[in-house]
Amino acid sequence: MSKTPSDKLFRLIHSLSGSELRYVSIYLKRQASRSDQKYLLLFQTIAAQETQDEPALQREVYGDEKITSRKYSQLKAYLYQAILNALQLYDEGTSVVYKINNLIQQVQVLYNRSHYRECLELLAKGKKIGEEYELFLELIEILNWRKKIAYAREDIAFLDSELEKMDAEEQGHIARIRNLSAYQRMLYQLIISRRKYAVLRSADQQQWLQEMLADPLLQSPENALSKRARILYFRIRSNAAYSMLKYEDFYEFSTAQISLMEKYPMLLKEDKSAYIYGRTNLILACGLLGKYEEVKSNLLIFKGLKGDSKDDDFRIFKHYNTLSFRLCIQTGAFEEGWNILQEHLKDLPKYEGQSLERGSFYFQYFYISFGNGNYDEAHKYLNLWLDLPRSIEREDLQSLARMLNLIIHYEMGNTVLLESLIKNTYRYLRRKNQVYEFEKALLQFFQQTVKGNDRSTLASAREELKSAIEELAEQPSEKILLEYFDFTSWIESKINKIPFATVIANRYQRAK
């Protein structure tokens, strides 16, 4: 038997929800023989460990008994397979896809024994489930079984009267599958572009998005041939609206998506992630439009969500914290954000096994720390963000991180280092071969700062930077990055000599 990787079993056990752990434990107890319950003991011991400790596991399972590495590896491999078997049975009881496929398997068993009437009863039950949950592939298989059974029974009258109708049904299901697949492809393409760029700013990017939105499928939700396809329609339109900075549309399409999903809750049983992302987008849209009371009410709904798996729980944890941080940032409640951050950091280790990407939080850690005036902490998190392995994701945020790095060192009074960082930033932007006006304006400001000019010149430079930022904020190609960090409030805090957090909080109070 092949050797199980050292952490494979540990990660599997620690990815299980509470109900899954209980189910697997009961399954293993039933399967364990009286003479050898080592794999049950191994399961219980691993589940109780916070971090993997192989020597402790071996002592707990074998005691003073002499063992070989091969024997221990075989025990782990056996337990791994037993857990997978148990989870298959668990999913059969909770997944509608498993349920309908089990019915089809039972049809095969009965068909082999010529129990055709009972086969038809099961197929009728399966068809009802398939139509309710839009399981088009399974519905096609059910149609094929009905034809096969009619042929086996030599029911020519049935085939003569129903064959054309069943063929039309099958073609309808195939059309819905293709329709759904087309929407899925567009959504994935849009998600890729969103991960690469904060907003589609270049002419080529904008043209690509306009061409995609011109697709006939995106002209009306009526072109979606199923409820699942219609949900994808609203997801695509909401994400596209965000990329185009059309925040009213972003809000409208996100609201429509949530309303549709709540109207058909049965579709959430198999995959709740779409609802989590949809609710996230709705809260984000509310924040961008200054609808902060709606942000707060939606956050309460979000906090009350219950996942169907540990993966769902992690998504809820991640997005709820991200959105809570964002609300504190937008309203200037940095002290509250700092308290939320400390609780968040305590809870974070619970999700280390859930594909946790700490890097997705680093920018907000930086922002909350910066708003509290904890510049050393802010600098630490910004460096962690800058040191992340580069990928295609959010390429345009690399330059933003470098702009923020300049601001941090300015706040920390590192004038000598700032001069070197300005040169490095210029070199980076030249290599990128795409420098935006906002980046030029900020670099010019810092160049004037390091020259050590008199106070009146520096005061004038601050006013010029403020005017430049306010003007650039009206341009779609510059606007999105200026919204990631409130550069206007930062420069105002320098001009008026008041804390950054106070400027944002005052603006929020005036807008209420």
Image (spheres, rainbow, N blue to C red):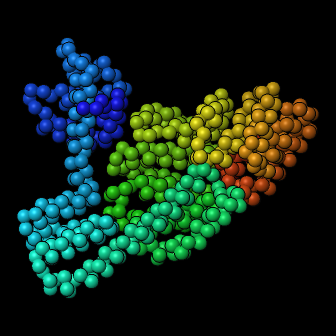
* Residue located 25% across and 67% down the image: 141
- Quarter-of-image position of residue 423: top right
With respect to residue 59, does 228 lie above or below? below
With respect to residue 235, does 317 lie above or below? above
Q: Nearer the viewer, residue 162 or 317?
A: 162
- Quarter-of-image position of residue 228: bottom left
* Residue located 29% across and 79% down the image: 167
Q: Nearer the viewer, residue 75 or 485?
A: 75
Q: Is residue 348 left or right of residue 72?
A: right
* Residue located 52% across and 63% down the image: 186
Q: Is residue 273 visible?
A: yes
Q: Is residue 381 left or right of residue 503?
A: left
Q: Nearer the viewer, residue 106 or 457?
A: 106
With respect to residue 335, does 153 lie above or below? below
Q: Is residue 91 left or right of residue 480?
A: left
Position of residue 247 measured from the top left corner of the image (x, y, whole percent): 61, 62
Q: How many marks?
A: 0
* Residue located 81% across and 48% down the image: 466
Q: Is residue 503 visible?
A: no
| Quadrant into which the N terminus falls | top left
Position of residue 266 measured from the top left corner of the image (x, y, whole percent): 32, 63
Position of residue 255 measured from the top left corner of the image (x, y, whole percent): 50, 64
Position of residue 15 measured from the top left corner of the image (x, y, whole percent): 34, 39
